[in-house]
Image (cartoon, helix red, strand yellow):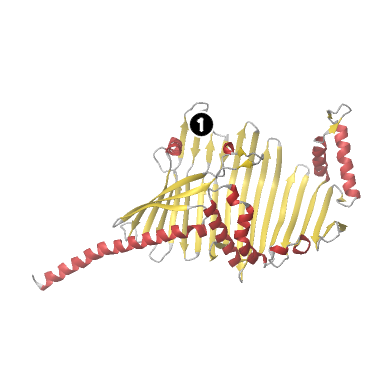
Amino acid sequence: MSNTASKWVAGLFIVGALGVGVPWSIGQKVESDFRAAIAAAPDHYPYPVSLLRYERGLFSSVAETQQMFDIGPDPDDITIDDDGNPVMPPSRLVPLTLHHAISHGPRLDGIRLARFVNTLKLEDKLQKAVSRVFGTAEPVTLTVDIGFGGGASGALVSPAVDTTLPADGDAKASHILWSGLTGRFSMNGDHLVASLDAPGLKIDDNAFVIGPVTMKTDLTAVADTVWTGTFGSTFASFSANGAAGAVSLSDLHVDSDTTDTSGILHSGATVTFKEMRFNEVSVSDSRLRLMLDRIGTQALAELSRTLNRYTAQQAGKTPDATDLQRMFDAMKPSLAALATRQPIFAVEDLSFTSPQGKVQFSGQVQYLGDGNFEDFAVGTDVAAGARLAAPLALIDLMLQMRASKAVIPGPDGEPIQLSAEQIAASAQASLDGAIAQGLLTVDGDRASTVIEFKGGALTVNGKPLGAQPI
């Protein structure tokens, strides 16, 4: 064999070896990383996750994982012991199986370490129900590409559906119009950017309508399970018509923002909507702003890991094994670390416009202790305050509703139904009493109150109530 021919043969051998060896090596790494992620799931995820199978090939692999969701005990299985106490049965676990089709190594359609195509593997009854809507198409598919540099990107899709389900037993025929769903994400290092668009869902024309729906997020991991950044979503409309009446919601926006400054988190969430209506009753221009401050980043991460581990380990056990005291004992060290920052929770703004006028509320609670819950005392370890302003007409309406439910026995012991005049008089007496005691301050057609609790003393509009230390 000539020298040139020998070089060609050697070159082909090397290329062939690389063509087999590189995908095999990549496949081995992908499997190793996948198994490690399943093993670490209890620290990051509150539901038990198990690997059912992993079959690795040269250029592709197949895996299945199962997640167990705890939906609590069946009420029909609750029994009573000899002392008359309820005996709770074990919680029910609902399995969700995911099928993972994995390709690894360089491909003609892109250079990447691996691609995961994830689909649901449904049980027979659920599969049959889903197939009635989606036919042979997958109801939802998540594709994830893992780059050689460790970054990830992917897409979440659900196909559009326009179908009529035939009548089945007592169920009437139903028309479903689902415009599909498209979501995309990319993650490089600790930075995640994601978006989702769902044009809408209609069932039986106007019986149930939702959409369009959009979501966007831009987050950065600052600790294990702790992210900072922004999240925003919009629900253009929602409406439903049923036997109880009609309910609708328009221009719903949900936004959140979290920042980390020197290991301390500040997080806020805002919910607004233009109008919410139930039959003939409506409120408009509603806004809710919640805030968490003085939260230690590392302490929150450890609390999250502890709670996830506890929840995953206790899934399916009896309520006796998962009571609140056991959970608190498991979380106590991380809760104490979190408390040492003296965190604050606040409702910075809760407001809406009713037919009677605008209602405004704000308030906050702060823990002032040292994190030692053994000597916790409300009077020294908690400070709180709240402000409320509302139309007098709305307060009067609420007092009338309360008075109308009062049960007053008659001469024969039977309850007496109050007249409209008696209900109005009772409500007015309650309102006058609250004003006379200084519980309400009136300015024109509006009333307000300011409540403060500090050092074990409670004041309402500056007037001490129960000033003795607690």
Q: Measured from the top left, where is residue 469 in percent x and y? A: 83, 61
From this view, report whether residue 157 is shown above or below residue 187: above
Report the residue that reaches farthest toward the right. Answer: 436
- Dot 1 falls on a residue whose secondary structure is strand
Residue that appears at 82% across and 42% down: 393
Q: Nearer the viewer, residue 28 or 325?
A: 325
Q: Residues within 10 Å of mark 1 (few under 14, many from 20)?
A: few
Report the residue that reaches farthest toward the left. Answer: 1
In-image side of 138 versus 332 (left or right): left
Quarter of the rendering occupied by the N terminus: bottom left
**Within the image, what quadrant is residue 365 found in?**
bottom right
Residue type indicated by callout 1: Ser
Instruction: Residue under label 1, please give it.
Output: 174
From this view, report whether residue 143 is shown above or below residue 149: above
In this orientation, does residue 113 appear?
A: no
Report the residue that reaches farthest toward the front. Answer: 82
Q: Nearer the viewer, residue 465 or 48?
A: 48
In this orientation, does residue 288 appear?
A: yes
Q: Measured from the top left, where is residue 109 in percent x and y? A: 33, 56
**Within the image, what quadrant is residue 15 found in?**
bottom left
From this view, report whether residue 358 is shown above or below residue 185: above
Residue that appears at 53% across and 35% down: 203
Quarter of the rendering occupied by the C terminus: bottom right
**Within the image, what quadrant is residue 159 found in?**
top left
Q: Measured from the top left, where is residue 207 in percent x and y? A: 58, 34
Residue that appears at 38% across and 61% down: 32
In-image side of 448 versus 88 (left or right): right
